[in-house]
Amino acid sequence: MKKIFLVSMAIFIAFGFLAGSASAAVRVRGYIKPSTGRYVAPSYRSSPNKSIWDNYSTKGNYNPYTGKKGSVSPYKSFKW
């Protein structure tokens, strides 16, 4: 019984670390566009960094909040 408990705790802790490291979402608050006066609903986006490979819209990735697959080529905005 003690062995099962230790194994389950180890799995629980491992998944906790994985879930914590995988959260790269930033909440964007809703706002009103000054140019048109239209309201833009709140949403989530990937956290800002210098990588072009881990954005929700990059081909090969998907947005976990909307379920949409990324369609933008990572090389499109790459600057040499």
Image (cartoon, rainbow, N blue to C red):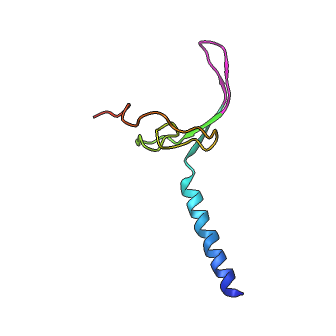
In the displayed structure, 35 sits above or below 71; it is above
Left or right, 34 with reference to 51: right
Dominant SS of magenta comes to: loop
In the displayed structure, 19 sits above or below 79; it is below
Image location (x, y in percent) of residue 49: 44, 42
Instruction: Return the residue nearer the eye: 64 or 14.
Output: 64
Which quarter of the figure has residue 30?
top right
Q: Which residues are magenta?
A: 30-42
In the displayed structure, 41 sits above or below 57; it is above
Left or right, 42 with reference to 54: right
User: Hey, which residue is sitting farthest right in the picture?
Assistant: 1
Image location (x, y in percent) of residue 58: 47, 38
Image location (x, y in percent) of residue 31: 65, 25
Q: Is residue 41 a member of the stretch shown in magenta?
A: yes
Image location (x, y in percent) of residue 34: 61, 15
Instruction: Return the residue nearer the eye: 28 or 7.
Output: 7
Residue lying at 47% horizontally and 43% vertically, measured from the top left: 60
Residue lying at 69% horizontally and 81% vertically, measured from the top left: 5
Residue lying at 41% horizontally and 34% vertically, measured from the top left: 73
Which quarter of the figure has residue 63?
top right
Quadrant (top left, top right, bottom left, bottom right) of the N terminus: bottom right
Left or right, 70 with reference to 1: left
Q: Is residue 24 a member of the stretch shown in magenta?
A: no
User: Hey, which residue is sitting farthest top in the picture?
Assistant: 36
Left or right, 52 with reference to 18: left
Residue lying at 49% horizontally and 34% vertically, measured from the top left: 71
